[in-house]
Image (tube, rainbow, N blue to C red):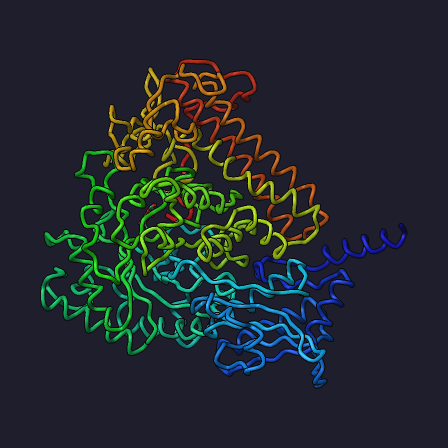
Amino acid sequence: MLKKLIVFVFCLVCIDSVANNGYNLWLQYRFIQNEELRLNYQSNIQKLIPVGNTESIKVGLEELKRALNGMLGSEFLSETHDEYANTLLFGSEENLSEDIRIQLGNAFNEINDEGFIIRSFSVKGKKYIVISGKTDVGVLYGVFNFLKLLQTHQSIEKLNIVDSPKIKIRVLNHWDNLDRTVERGYAGFSIWDWHRLPDYIDPRYIDYARANASIGINGTVLNNVNANALILTPQYLEKVEALANVFRPYGIKVYLTARFSAPIEIGGLKTADPLDPDVIKWWQDKAKEIYARIPDFGGFLVKANSEGQPGPQNYGRNHVDGANMLANALDPFGGIVMWRAFVYSEHDTTDRAKQAYTEFVPYDGQFKDNVIIQVKNGPIDFQPREPFHPMFGAMPKTPLMMEFQITQEYLGQSTHSVFLPKLYEEVLQSDTYRKGKGSIVAKVIDGTLDNKRLTGIAGVSNIGNDINWTGNPMLQANWYGFGRLAWNPYLHADTIAEEWLRETFSNHEDFVEPVKEMMLNSLEAVVDYMTPLGLHHIMATGHHYGPGPWVSNLSRPEWNPVYYHKADSLGIGFDRTPTGSNATAQYAPEVASKFNNLETCPEKYLLWFHHVSWHYKLKNGETLWDGMALKYQEGVNQVASMRYTWKQVKPYVDEERFNEVDMLLNIQYKEAKWWRDACLLYFKQYSKMPLPKGVEKPTQTLGYFESLRFPFAPGN
Ligand code: GCW
């Protein structure tokens, strides 16, 4: 008992005394206090043998040394030459000796070029753990996965892991501007120090690459989709080249956004018409120039004819003309075009939720092979909750890639601790019914539903130059979780939360279990205190920080929250059934009829698809008004319980990160109440009904909430 107590106190001291600013993300490599486990690991890994000499193998070796020294102690790996020492050997298939290769049997047939094998076996009394793959980058992924086993304290006695990514293009989209501001960025400035590049290589670039490689992210779009053509000039391409050189050993390709009007702005042409021969040639030459510097350049991401960005429609051409022209320029070098479907027009008076589908679906099958259409997860815009985008069920002949937003433009930005893999999972598991039951979005994205060769997934990054990268230690989990789902879109949020917590903070069950639960409930909390029951886009104008359901004076109708909630004296919600905008017709009949029918429409989408009376009876018997008010309250209560949970786990968290998260949860709590009070006061004007029992009375007036201004809110 006494011994246990001493160990316990010792642990507390250890945890508290090690300052941790979160910079090391989930690659903490904490010393393993459990002696039995540590000795077991040490005895299994007495010697490290890298096979091969590429940069990827070298960075793999560096990572292993750093990690093993951290977890097993600094005396570890003090050059043992004992030929019988138990060995960790890693290298690609072609570099393995015949003896070792034989041990891996036909596992190589089960993996793709980025996959890996981790297997343990004994030969002549000597134990081996072998990490291999078809390529050295595959091996590196294996190394990181092996380290995850150690970080999460799993057995390495009988290893037989064979794994490959299911999606080909797994990219972060940085909405980073050349002046280092980040559109919708809430974690400081851009990590790309353009001014000092190419000569100054910030060590952060390497840590960024390590972090991404550790979760299998294999591409990065460096600059904002609201693009600046200067990135395509030699002055900037030289800088891009320097970054590409840093990232290459980690399997990360660089992509750029292409401003459609670049031929005019930096090329001196009179037009950017995609069918103009000079324009075509300009892009071909530009591609040649880029590939001369960066032979493995990934390609272009394009936002065209959307929110004022230039595009082919400026010249009477269409998305196919624009995308294919760029795709032709990149094709000789193996590059791709990621063409975004985020379009809606001020001249189109139909429901905004319908416009992308209307504009793109008729082009199904017309894009070149190296074009992939990047579609946001829902038909409006990264709301706390949206039904899946109908395009996912409607373009069988066109590769479609998912665009998730990791940065929390509409979800409390970086002060609210929301675990987004829960949202991603919900979307990926949604059934499009395109080929009958089971045609889930994950199968569209990984290409298995329609046998697609080119597959992809993008996450709009939440990274900035804050010391902890994401402005809130808890939100590192969203970068991590995006990467894990990009690798395997069938993973569960639960699994992801657990591994992230173990790697990032602690393996102690009394820490992992409650905090995991807190994370898994956090999405529902934010949905409830911001936009319960299918409400959407009622955030304040421009910066989208805080509530603004009253906003009705913006020039474009679909920029106004009142357009989305349509509250009136009778009820609330957007009728998207056949009696309204009929947006539901864009889904497969099975899905459409489910959404159309009030009996079967999931209540979480109720006000997304229906305008219902304030007296409408919810499934639990409450009136809509009461139910909605109680949901707002429930969201607030949920945050209160998150704060409580966090306080309970104080003994397991270092002081610095504990305090940070604690303070941020306090802000979240304050803001959850702000959301509840402002929205309920506003909607109450229409419902004319009192707040039900159980909902706290607001302490401010609606006028007060409406008067709040945040001229310097970040990310705008
Ligand atoms: O969500 C909206 C944002 C814009 C963004 C746009 C887009 C980059 O408010 O800031 O622009 O979407 O995705 O293109």
- Quadrant position of residue 221: bottom left
Q: Residue at x 74, y 67 (%)?
A: 40
Residue at image position (40%, 71%) is 243
Q: Identify the residue at horizontal 71%, vertical 45% (top origin).
A: 510
Judge by depth and name the residue closer to the eye, 148 or 290. 148
Position of 270 compared to 46: left or right? Answer: left
Could you say which quadrant of the image residue 271 lies in?
bottom left
The percent position of residue 235, horizontal first and vertical second, equals 30, 73
Which of the 4 image quadrants contains residue 515? top right
Q: Position of residue 550 (x, y in %)?
A: 35, 28
Looking at the image, residue 70 lies above or below residue 472: below
The picture places residue 67, in percent across and down from the top left corner, at 63, 69
Q: Is residue 374 visible?
A: yes
Q: How many marks?
A: 0
Furthest residue in direction right, as rendered: 2
Instruction: Tell me the residue at 80%/57% (across/down).
Output: 10
Looking at the picture, tell me which residue is in the foreground, 195 or 236. Answer: 236
Could one spot residue 203 in this view of the protein?
Answer: no
